[in-house]
Image (spheres, helix red, strand yellow):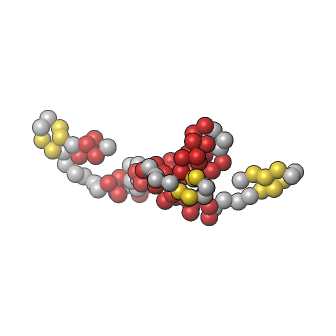
Amino acid sequence: MANFFWGDEDGSSKWHWKQWHALCRPTCENGLGLRKLEDILSAFTLKLWWNFFTSKSLGAIFMRQKYCVHGEVQNSSQTWKCMQRVRHLVLNNIQKLIKNWESSF
């Protein structure tokens, strides 16, 4: 994205009209309404953690068996480390609903 806004054009550098944080502002505040990459990464990581926590898929089962053996976390990958950084956000904002003898998160 940086090359699109500030990269080379015909061998010469483009002008830096605005800083990245200014481009991420809403259009009503004279920005372009772009999302911050950190926010996008956080959202995807939260979704990955939620799927790991609630899913019975093959991927979730694999992750639980690989990283959560006997309640201890084993050697971890970069993905697992990212998931652990957002774990507290999910756990602090989770609510359990009990209705008709079934629970839902």
As drawn, which residue projects farthest toward the front?
A: 70
Vertical relation: 58 (above or below) 91: above
Q: Quadrant of the N terminus?
A: top left
Q: Is residue 11 left or right of residue 74?
A: left
Q: Is residue 33 left or right of residue 46?
A: left
Q: Nearer the viewer, residue 50 or 75?
A: 75
Q: Nearer the viewer, residue 102 or 71?
A: 71
Q: Residue at x 54, y 47 (%)?
A: 66
Q: Residue at x 87, y 51 (%)?
A: 100
As drawn, which residue projects farthest toward the left?
A: 11
Q: Residue at x 53, y 56 (%)?
A: 73
Q: Nearer the viewer, residue 28 or 4?
A: 4
As drawn, which residue projects farthest toward the top?
A: 10
Vertical relation: 96 (above or below) 44: below
Q: Position of residue 50 (x, y in %)?
A: 60, 50
Q: Is residue 39 visible?
A: no
Q: Residue at x 66, y 48 (%)?
A: 54
Q: Position of residue 2 (x, y in %)?
A: 28, 46
Q: Is residue 46 visible?
A: yes
Q: Position of residue 47 (x, y in %)?
A: 56, 48
Vertical relation: 19 (above or below) 5: below
Instruction: Please state the total of marks drawn on the protein image.
Output: 0
